[in-house]
Structure formats: C-alpha cells, structure tokens
Amino acid sequence: QIYKDLDKISEAVDGISGIALANGEGFLNKNLEGIMEYYHNHPKFLSMNVPTNGTVLPTQNILNKMHEYGVTASITRYEVVPEEKRSAMRKKFKENGIKSTTFESRKWYLHEYCSDRTCSEVEVCKKYKECERFFMLLDGKLWKCVTDATRVMAGIRPEQENDSLLVRDATIDEVRDFLMKKASVPHIESCYHCRGSVGSMVVEIPAGEQLK
C-alpha cells in the first residue's frame, strides 16, 4: 500500500527530491531492502536517506544495497548513545563507500499542543520558514507537517479537516491540489499552536532521552 501511495503522489508531481524513513530507527525497518529496491527502480525519486542514531549496525546485505543504489545515511548525535557506536557505524559506511552525514546538535521539542494562539503572524511565518518543511506519509495519510502528523497519531490533539489527505481514496488531481495548497502557504494553522522550531513558544527537551 505504501508503494501504491507513493506511486500516486509521484504521478501528481514532476519529481521528488528525496525520500527518507522517519520516526524511528531506520535500520530496524524489516522492509528496508524492499523500500530501497523500490526507490532504485522509481524514475521520479532523486535520492533516499536512512536516518539513524547509530545504535543499530546494518547488515552487510543492506550495506551492499545502499552502496549499489546510492542510498545515504544521516546519523544524529545523542548524548545517550556512546560515541564508539557512531564511530563504528561511520567506519562501516566508509568501508562500503556509503555517504553519511552526522548531525552534532540535533534538538527535540515538546510536542504539546497549545489550545490558544500565542504567536503573532510574523513569528508564526518565521517558525514555518525555519522548520523542517517536509511532507510525511503516515498510515496512508499525507501531511505537510511531520510534527503535526506525529502529534495527531499520538493522540495529543484531534485531527482537523484538511490536516491530511488519505492518498488511497484521492484522485491524482486531489493529491496535486493538496500538495500545491500546502506548499504555497506562508504557514499552516498548527504553527500557531506548536512548541517547536523557533520563537517564544519553543520548549526544548533532551534529545534521545530514553524512558524507563
């Protein structure tokens, strides 16, 4: 179903600059090899990235596929993960000719949803401009905001009309209209209520902190 959804999304656009596996440790994904093959055979995807925190070393078969297909990796540095684990992963990537990037100071934000609008129009536009502006496909729904999609799925706030689009039930034109509408606005409604990105409402929490 994910492949069908991605096929429909790609039909609505000229090209997709990149895809990535988000919201979890990429190298724990049981379908990773198949997803890489799908990416490699798709004419409209220009790149693919696997995010990781450096805790799970990929198998040699996965490393071979990443090298063959030009799949990159991004390693996030969290204090709770020993540096020797990240070093071992970087070494593996280098030995196998795989490009990787390490984010040294990744921040996490409180996903609380504020009921009131406490941001000005200027501030909320700045938040949206400086945020990670990716679309996310989650459980068949297409979202403009990764954080908002995660927040709704976690039950932090109820989903509202036009927040997302169920791709499997939409036409190509409806997918295109959703993409164009969300990509052309200076901000989305949820930016007014978000504790992330930048501005006076931001609440940072320790990145990668593990729960017992």
Image: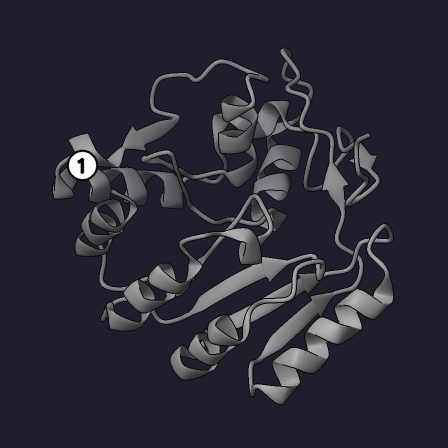
Q: Quadrant of residue 97?
A: bottom right
Residue 14 in the figure: left or right of residue 129: left
- Image coordinates of residue 84 in percent, x first then y, are 84, 69
The residue indicated by pointer 1 is 174
- 152 relative to 52, above or below: above
- 5 relative to 50, above or below: above
Q: How many marks?
A: 1
Residue found at x 44% / y 17%: 159
Residue found at x 57% / y 86%: 96
- Image coordinates of residue 165 in percent, x first then y, are 30, 31
Viewer-side residue, 180 vs 1: 1
Residue 185 in the figure: left or right of residue 178: right
- Image coordinates of residue 107 in percent, x first then y, are 76, 47
Amino acid beneath label 1 = Glu
Q: Under tag 1, what secondary structure?
A: helix
Viewer-side residue, 84 vs 111: 84
**Structural crowding at the residue carrying mark 1, measured as other residues with C-alpha within 10 Å and reported as few (<14), some (14–19) or many (≥20):** some
